[in-house]
Image: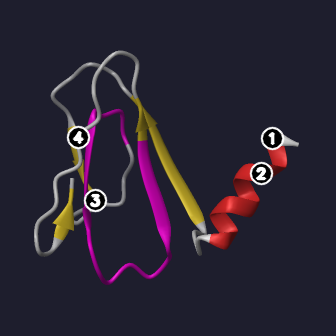
């Protein structure tokens, strides 16, 4: 069923951990390059390389358009 499809998809993609935040309509951005502490936020910055664990990151949005920004070393 649908409940079991998500873990199978993540495993197939090599993802071992899913980090999913809820949109809170703020200016808070988590910079996970500097800290692993998760707190309410509307954005995430992560390293492109060097992660010890394959993680997937996302934000559940309510009414805002999600945007992905990429640099040579990070995603936001």
Classify residue 47 as left or right of residue 7: left
Residue stretch rendered in magenta on the structure: 39-58
Instruction: Name which residue lies at 59% across and 70% down.
Output: 13
27 in the magenta segment? no
Which is more toward the observer, 14 or 37? 14
Task: Give the label on residue 32, or none.
Answer: 3
Q: How many discs mark residues in the rendered view?
A: 4
- Give neighbour class at mark 3: few <14, some 14-19, many 20+ (Cα, 10 Å): some
Q: Earlier in the sequence, mark 4 or mark 3?
A: 3
Q: Secondary structure at mark 1?
A: helix
Estimate the spatial distance between the alpha carbons at disc 2 and disc 4, rounded to whole Å. Answer: 26 Å
Which is more toward the observer, 52 or 34? 52
The answer to the question of whether label 1 and label 2 lie on touching residues, with beta carbons closer than 8 A, is: yes
Q: Earlier in the sequence, mark 2 or mark 3?
A: 2
Estimate the spatial distance between the alpha carbons at disc 1 and disc 4, rounded to whole Å. Answer: 27 Å
Estimate the spatial distance between the alpha carbons at disc 4 and disc 3, rounded to whole Å. Answer: 17 Å
Instruction: Name which residue lies at 36% across and 26% down.
Output: 23
Task: Give the label on residue 67, or none.
Answer: 4
Q: Nearer the viewer, mark 4 or mark 3?
A: 4
Estimate the spatial distance between the alpha carbons at disc 1 and disc 2, rounded to whole Å. Answer: 5 Å
Query: Which corner quadrant of the image does residue 41 belong to?
Result: top left
Q: Where is 57 relative to 59, above or below? A: below
- Residue carrying label 1: 2
The answer to the question of whether label 1 and label 4 lie on touching residues, with beta carbons closer than 8 A, is: no
- Give neighbour class at mark 2: few <14, some 14-19, many 20+ (Cα, 10 Å): few
The answer to the question of whether label 4 and label 3 lie on touching residues, with beta carbons closer than 8 A, is: no
The single residue placed furthest to the right in the displayed view is 1
Q: Earlier in the sequence, mark 1 or mark 4?
A: 1
Q: Nearer the viewer, mark 2 or mark 3?
A: 2
């Amino acid at each position: 069923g649908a409940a079991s499809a998500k873990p199978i998809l993540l495993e197939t993609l090599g993802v071992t951990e899913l980090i999913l935040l809820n949109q809170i309509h703020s200016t808070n951005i988590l910079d996970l390059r500097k800290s692993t502490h998760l707190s309410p936020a509307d954005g995430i910055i992560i390293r492109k390389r060097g992660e010890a664990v394959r993680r997937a990151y996302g934000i559940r949005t309510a009414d805002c358009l999600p945007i992905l920004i990429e640099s040579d070393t990070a995603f936001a």
